[in-house]
Image: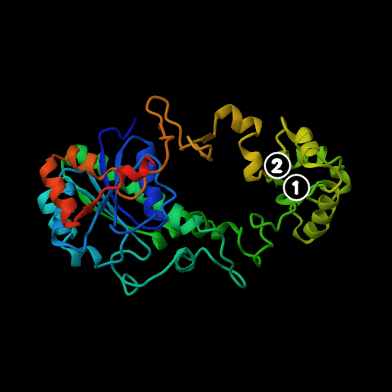
């Protein structure tokens, strides 16, 4: 796999950092999640392919142990607010001094500088600060844009870029991944397309925000939906053909004032057939009309089936296959159960060169925990 041989230490946190770690694990990195001790369960649902080591970072010995792990690792992924790692004595300056090749990835909401650097926040706040919400009362979508796209994916990109650069310089570096800036960067198209007039009208009345009748979703007779994206004239003609509408009897496609009328007409037409009926009509055409698939439908759709776009783990739970697909070194996601907290403490420390006596001493002192027996019950 592409990241085979890369050792990653991921400090346990909420959704963005765990997903970043899972991306790295899917593509071959050995990811070790460092959990807190005396915690029964984890909220990390993005632990595929990782191993768990439980360390008490409230002890001097625990902090020292983590330092030793970082010395022998390629990447440290930390999700804390500015200042937390410095208080622990685990600042980038200190760790890079001991391991100059370390990639120190800091994934936070607001970044490592600025007035908000130490402030609490969540996806809705980071998205609000990115400039990607506009119009009347903004609504909060699922936490995909700031947490996962702006945070996890951009941080993973930064790590891979730093690893690539290290092959030339031999040096590690610090990654300051801000979810605000990541979300803003994801919205570059909005910023750079103002001059095209795509966003001049109120929200919901522009071409790409459901204002256009040929770029919207429509309910079918069985209560499901079809998505329409027939922007180009040749695609629009295919849409009208499928709907059995005569282009000569309709207003011009780009007549903004006639869009409400066309939308009402399209709504009536789509409501006359089921989603399956419309799929049969439009499949194989360039009308840019596709079914809106639910969780229950998506993996059984012929296209996704042929590409094996979704997979099941050992417990039968379904999830998306890692993307993108690499021709020579594709991802090979782990299909076994996610680790419980501290499940792999002993085996990981042994791999890092600790003796059985040292491990037993740390276990007795409460510096680490091992729940390997519990995991096998």
Q: Secondary structure at mark 1?
A: loop
Image check: 264 left or right of 156?
Answer: right
Q: Which image quadrant: the C terminus?
A: top left
- Horizontal and vertical percent position of residue 87: 19, 67
Q: Which residue is mark 2?
A: 291
Q: Which residue is mark 1?
A: 224
Question: Crowdedness of circle 2 by 10 Å Cα count: few (<14), some, many (20+)?
Answer: many
Count of marks placed on residues: 2
Q: Secondary structure at mark 2?
A: strand
Image check: 227 left or right of 368?
Answer: right
Q: Foreground: 231 or 311?
A: 311
Q: Residue at x 33, y 32 (%)?
A: 2
Vertical order, 123 against 24 (above or below): below
- Horizontal and vertical percent position of residue 42: 39, 54
Residue 233's tag is none
Q: Quadrant of residue 57?
A: bottom left
């Amino acid at each position: 796999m592409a990241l085979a041989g890369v050792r990653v230490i991921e400090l346990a946190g909420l959704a963005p950092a765990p997903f970043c770690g899972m991306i790295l694990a899917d593509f071959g990195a050995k990811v070790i999640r460092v959990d807190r001790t005396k915690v029964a369960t984890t909220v990390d649902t993005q632990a595929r392919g990782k191993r768990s080591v439980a360390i008490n970072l409230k002890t001097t010995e625990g902090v020292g142990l983590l330092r030793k792990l970082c010395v022998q690792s390629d990447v440290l992924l930390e999700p804390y607010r500015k200042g937390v790692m410095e208080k622990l004595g685990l600042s980038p300056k200190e760790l890079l001094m001991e391991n100059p090749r370390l990639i120190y990835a800091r994934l936070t909401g607001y970044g490592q500088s600025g007035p908000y650097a130490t402030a609490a926040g969540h996806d809705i706040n980071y998205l609000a600060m990115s400039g990607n919400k506009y119009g009347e009362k903004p609504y909060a979508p699922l936490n995909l844009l700031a947490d996962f796209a702006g945070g996890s994916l951009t941080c993973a990109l930064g790590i891979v870029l730093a690893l690539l650069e290290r092959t030339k310089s031999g040096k590690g570096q610090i990654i300051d991944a801000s979810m605000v800036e990541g979300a803003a960067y994801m919205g570059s198209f909005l910023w750079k397309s103002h001059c095209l007039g795509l966003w001049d009208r109120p929200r919901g009345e522009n071409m790409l925000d459901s204002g256009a009748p040929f770029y919207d979703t429509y309910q079918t007779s069985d209560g499901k939906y079809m998505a329409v994206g027939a922007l180009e004239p040749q695609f629009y003609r295919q849409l009208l053909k499928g709907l059995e509408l005569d282009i000569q009897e309709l207003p011009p496609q780009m007549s903004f004032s006639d869009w409400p009328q066309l939308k009402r007409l399209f709504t009536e037409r789509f409501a006359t057939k089921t989603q399956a009926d419309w799929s049969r009509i439009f499949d194989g055409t360039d009308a840019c009309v596709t079914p809106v698939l639910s969780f229950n439908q998506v993996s059984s759709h012929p296209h996704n089936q042929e590409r094996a776009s979704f997979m099941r783990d050992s417990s039968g739970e379904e999830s998306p296959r890692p993307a993108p697909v690499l021709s020579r070194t594709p991802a090979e996601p782990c299909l076994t159960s996610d680790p419980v907290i501290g499940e792999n403490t002993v085996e990981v420390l042994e791999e890092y060169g600790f003796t059985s006596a040292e491990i037993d001493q740390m276990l007795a002192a409460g510096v680490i925990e091992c729940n390997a027996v519990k995991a096998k019950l």
